[in-house]
Image (cartoon, helix red, strand yellow):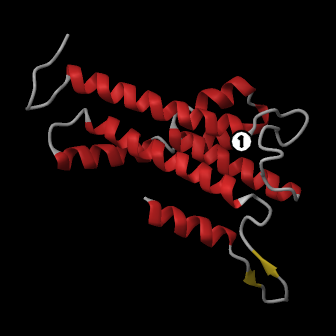
Amino acid sequence: LLPSLIFIIVSYKVKIELKHGGKASIIDKTDPALFALFMFLYASCSVTFTFLCSTFFKKANSAAAGAGIIWFFSYLPYIFISLRYETMTLFDKIISLIVNNLALSEGIQLIGQFEGKGTGINFNNWTSGISVDDNFSMIIVMAFMVLNHFIHLTLMWYFDQIIPGDHGIAKP
């Protein structure tokens, strides 16, 4: 995933010439190191999530197809979250971070909100929310991505022990 991440980070941060003069990038003010860390955490969660999904299948082809379907459907709840973001409590936002695709979506939404504010997210403001009324911050999103990583690894180890597939003996 590293080449893809590098391409995404560079393409979002490189300033290009505008038709009417000046230069701009997609995320102009956000710290590139923080954005890279955020994307790396997402990639790490993605790998462990797909490994977790693969423990439920016996064949590699069915595991790839099943993980892809689960992956796609894990993003769909964001449609409802984005429509209700302003009315959601901090607890509701945090609970949605357990699904790593939703964590990515909410992190990107925060980046967009801070870019719209004109500050971008950097290491000075990554612990604060977009407004005084909203204390949902990028550090919460990134902390839950780390937590998701360990949850996926733990569940993967557990299910691999109790559902070992064709090779191995199931443990109680």
Quadrant of the image containing the N terminus: bottom left
Query: Residue 102 occupies which quadrant of the picture?
Result: top right
Q: Residue at x 48, y 50 (%)?
A: 43
- Residue 4 lies, in percent from the top left, at 47, 65
Q: How many marks?
A: 1
Disc 1: which residue: 138
Frontmost residue, 83 versus 64? 64
- From what the image shows, is residue 148 above or below residue 83? above
Going by the image, does 39 lie left or right of 111?
A: left
Most foreground residue, 17 or 5: 5
Relative to 20, 89 lies left or right: left
The quadrant of the rendering that contains the C terminus is top left
Residue drawn 61% across the image and 70% down it: 10
Identified by mark 1, the residue type is Met
Q: Residue furthest top?
A: 172
Q: Is residue 42 above or below residue 150?
A: below
- Residue 62: horizontal and vertical position, in percent? 20, 45
Image position of 23 with respect to 162: above or below: below
Give neighbour class at mark 1: few <14, some 14-19, many 20+ (Cα, 10 Å).
many
Q: Quadrant of residue 11?
A: bottom right
Q: Position of residue 168 (x, y in %)?
A: 10, 26
Which residue is at the front of the view, 90 or 12? 12
